[in-house]
Image: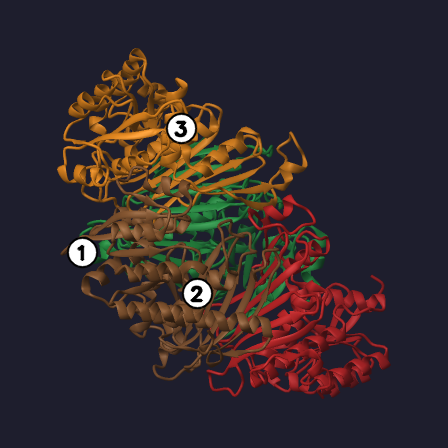
Chain colours: A green, B orange, C brown, D red
């Protein structure tokens, strides 16, 4: 590796603290600074590490000039902080969703391009080893055409601070994974949402996505389930893949009938189920290594800003559908500010 | 038991053969005849049983005058055969869906009422011991308010003869169970469906139901999955119930936070999960015993015709939504023929 | 099929009633009579069937002269009833264990041979479709050498009548399966047993079997577990098979390292796990069809009497080890009466 | 917390590196030094930490005078290194097994007592949150009398360096847990072991333990299984507990019949199964915090040396039984050197 990259973390909530922990022992990276308005969080993050902590992003950027910055602040501050980092000449990883509005997201993407820095979005599930193995198998054609993708991401009510509802908080994970796996764009969506716990934001959500190529996407997301589940089902012509994100487990249920008559989707019968061996790794570590490598290689970013914008547009369309009770086409949100 | 009821089965496909098998050794019931246009099916059904087999419903009804009849013919013939049985003075169990059209269903219900016979619909999942235990617990208030019900009913492509798509074939099971558990009516629906195997009928389906009381229903149904799953999830304020229909397993995931502050839906945290012991029974047997008991008691039928009509109306609304790409209110289908 | 075999069932406890149910609709077989000293059991078994019921085996045999008989009486009566059937010229299936003592078992085997009738033992797990598929794969060499076989057969205390302890009641199932799968004989055993519920018989048991070829057998059997489990694990050089007897599920966990270096048992690493599709069938039905076919073919019996004797000898050795606290070699029990 | 304890880690294999990682951010503890003869391991362990690394235990002890030391060296070196630490006045945590021989173990215990330092053994499974919750429930009497404990600890062949066989490497975990949960001593054992991979040490093992109070212990341990399982089953009069060590899951299968008639062990029937919520924590962290607290409190150690000696004695008895083919009483090994 040619050189060591100097990295900083801005925002030290539970996710930001994880970024700091991982960067601290990532080869080829030196964690040089952290920042958060909460002094206690800063104190914990610098403990036992020979690095300074700052109250503001501005101070951190001015004093330490990092090569790259992880922006792990509340969504409403993504644009302001990421923009400051870009202007300071740093490559930027911004947590998902990329920004609070489509316009803000586009401004960030434009600014990064003008500044010649890499802007990537923390769509961390792409770096889950089980998802990477699934993507590899799909690209090899193991399943044939994808007919339906279902994601279920449910669990207890989170105690961390949120300034958005469950769609914007959790939805981008699976929206991005569906786009990534299908290599296709969402055409229209329909959604229902409810708000049961008095936070002013929706906490129970179900959505349907129609992709241009005809595949069907189902989202089942909420903060009201007293057990945690993060799962994905990819129904294909030749069989069904299932992913348990948390356990990093990938299985394939083979359709014997499809296998028997290649090229013709004749029928569906039960074949063997195989669970593939997956070498477990922390997705955040894989993500940050990928960003490091992209910076050293001069790009492109592991997840382009355009993917973050597309995922945000789908989330906006889902919110609008939940509010209007009608299907929403992605064209309708393309012009949203 | 005051008297033995004389029973007949019309239609001897795989489900009809099951009716005959169960009725043959149900206490208080004597299987007196079976009918099917397929001579081989008749031969098998009467083998080792001292009963006559008929080619037509008309012949069976005329010669044996049964107390009750199970109508297990293709959906398109439900009205004709059930009507003949009603006119012959027999109580009737008709398999789901109750009829091919809402008008036909209403004609059957009216005819049964005029004739003073019981008409029941084979919504068999109500008689699944795990569902009965769930209903009892919901009615006792264990879960508090129901927020969402999800049903998944998927599996390989069926080789038996079908004259309908997957919504009409499998959907009524879960539509009926949702209405039954929630004790509420569907207000509007949205659906997406696809037809991948060239049968002229949809084989991949996803639907959302909005109930009048606000609960959300999700249907995930298809014939394209190379492993069988029939499951139900009932998300409530105080916890989540799950049912595995086939294995007759009922679990409850308790929400500790809700339990802590009765009356206020404060939060959701992970509490214990409990799997209840269920005495396994064949649902068809429970269903036929319930019908026998209802006949001896002079009514009401275990599942009223109105429930069959309501489930059919929801299925019709889902089909229409799948065709139009728009949400459909139940009022819109109320006037369908 | 050349001719229809006339069959009878002697003993109508829960297992005997199952024999009658299955024989009543087995092609090529005609159930001609049943017998049990309990009049109510006889009444139930003949209900709806045009066959006579008897109080005694002697009467049944004298009056109906069946081609073959299923002997499903308490173990203490196996010899007497099976001997009577043999003397009446019938082929005999006797439930496991083959007899109450080794001497009785040998007398039965000798008598059958002299009479020229087939004697088979109801080691039903051999007819479990998951076990048959496992046997086929082992014989093809998929796993390589078998290193260890573990069986766990536990559940609630049975309410049916038993005149033996848990070793003789449940042990023969897995002892027979281990001999069958390994195609090898047990050399010595060690066992620990306890009696916790006051029945005079042991109800908690653990045993270790050493096979001549070096494989290790582990038995974990009791009536004190408040959930039912019947499972088998076959650890081989190239991977591990697991069987869930009740669910008829067969899985294989591949050892990648073994696969990499054929012929040398180099190491063990985690490879894929595969669950094979198994066409589910009732093992008793498969067993009785196999006996029917063996009779028509003029033998040999599906499970030879020698297998029943060998399984009984191992069970006797296990009991003796549990009593003495010492390992017992099979040679020691060979001369037992 | 009154003061910060200065800690050192001697031995930096994979387990030693974990000790260093955890101690580095344990409140109330300051990691002051590490040692290992392998320079590369030392380099990795001190990277990003302001601490010195040593080649030898002697140098580390002489120069840094730690308050406590974790001894994570090969078993054959336990005595030498732990003794040096004790002589340097440090409290000592030695990994399991406590030493290579019973005599060595006793010498360590005596030395620690004379020196007035705490000596504890790394029986880490006691600090598994699921085990702690189980112990609490057993002590409260939830299960009633324990009848049988089964442990299964199997998985692929380990690539780390070992100087002992599978009994000494993995067995002490479960031997210790059984003694701890039962609060009872092993009376006699029986074992079978095999060596299939040419390392000179046994790699396939099964053992039976008889406790003084009558409980039965079963050990199923090997390095030949191509999937990892670490599980525990505690069969009690009133139900069965199960633990998945790795997933930190604790379940209870209630025996309804026992519950119905308190005081009399009448029968066993299937009651509900409950999975308790467990707050997941890294056992090593809990263990090291417990040792820190014990040092600050002036003792006693979290796991006394006597427990380590007892577990080693049982392991020795199991090895001897495996070699002789006979049961071995614990009295027989009590006088072993």
Q: Which mark is residue B290?
A: 3
**What distance separates the C-alpha of mark 1 from that of mark 3?**
46 Å
Q: Kindly tell me whether residue A230 is visible in this rendering.
A: yes
**Total of numbered circles in the picture?**
3
A28 is higher (above) or lower (below) than C24: below
Q: Which mark is residue C117?
A: none
Q: Residue at x 28, y 52 (%)?
A: C62
Q: Share a chain, discs 3 and 2? A: no
Q: Quadrant of residue B170?
A: top left
What element does badge 3 sit on?
Answer: helix
Image side of residue D81 versus residue C335, left or right: right
The answer to whether mark 3 and mark 2 are in CB contact below 8 A is: no
Percent x, y for residue D154? 52, 70
What element does badge 2 sit on?
Answer: helix
Percent x, y for residue B295? 37, 21
The answer to whether mark 1 and mark 2 are in CB contact below 8 A is: no
What element does badge 1 sit on?
Answer: loop
* Label 2 chain ID: C
Percent x, y for residue D153? 55, 69
Q: Residue at x 50, y 60 (%)?
A: C164
Q: Quadrant of residue C102?
A: bottom left
Q: Quadrant of the C terminus of chain B?
A: top left
Q: Which mark is residue C172?
A: 2
Q: Share a chain, discs 1 and 3? A: no
Q: Residue at x 71, y 63 (%)?
A: A47
Q: Share a chain, discs 1 and 2? A: no
Q: Quadrant of residue D284?
A: bottom right
Percent x, y for residue A107? 46, 46
* Label 1 chain ID: A
Q: Quadrant of the N terminus of chain B?
A: top left
- To which residue does mark 1 refer? A261
């Amino acid at each position: 590796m040619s050189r060591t990259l100097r990295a900083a973390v801005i925002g030290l909530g539970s996710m930001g603290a994880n970024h700091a922990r991982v960067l601290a022992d990532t080869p080829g990276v030196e964690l040089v600074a952290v920042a958060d308005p909460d002094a206690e969080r800063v104190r914990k993050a610098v403990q036992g590490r020979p690095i300074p902590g700052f109250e503001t992003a501005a101070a951190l950027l001015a004093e330490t000039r990092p090569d790259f910055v992880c922006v792990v602040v509340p969504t409403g501050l993504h644009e302001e902080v990421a923009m400051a980092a870009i202007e300071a000449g740093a490559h930027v990883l911004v947590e998902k969703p990329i920004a609070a509005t489509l316009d803000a997201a586009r401004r960030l993407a434009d600014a990064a391009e003008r500044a010649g820095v890499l802007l990537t979005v923390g769509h961390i599930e792409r770096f889950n080893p089980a998802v990477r193995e699934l993507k590899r198998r799909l690209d090899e054609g193991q399943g044939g055409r994808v007919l339906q993708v279902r994601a279920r991401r449910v669990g207890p009510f989170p105690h961390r601070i949120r300034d958005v509802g469950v769609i914007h908080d959790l939805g981008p994970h699976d929206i991005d994974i569906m786009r990534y796996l299908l290599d296709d764009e969402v055409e229209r969506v329909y959604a229902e949402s409810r708000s049961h716990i008095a936070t002013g934001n929706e906490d129970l959500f179900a959505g349907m996505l129609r992709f241009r190529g005809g595949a069907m996407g189902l989202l089942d997301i909420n903060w009201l389930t007293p057990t945690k589940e993060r799962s994905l089902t990819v129904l294909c012509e030749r069989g069904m893949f299932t992913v348990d994100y948390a356990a990093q487990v990938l299985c394939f249920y083979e359709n014997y009938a499809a296998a028997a008559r290649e090229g013709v989707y004749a029928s569906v019968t039960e074949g063997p189920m195989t669970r593939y061996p997956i070498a477990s790794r922390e997705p955040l570590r894989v993500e940050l290594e990928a960003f490091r490598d992209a910076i050293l290689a001069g790009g492109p970013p592991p997840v382009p800003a355009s993917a973050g914008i597309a995922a945000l547009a789908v989330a906006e369309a889902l919110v609008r559908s939940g509010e209007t009770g009608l299907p929403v086409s992605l064209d309708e949100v393309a012009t949203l500010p």
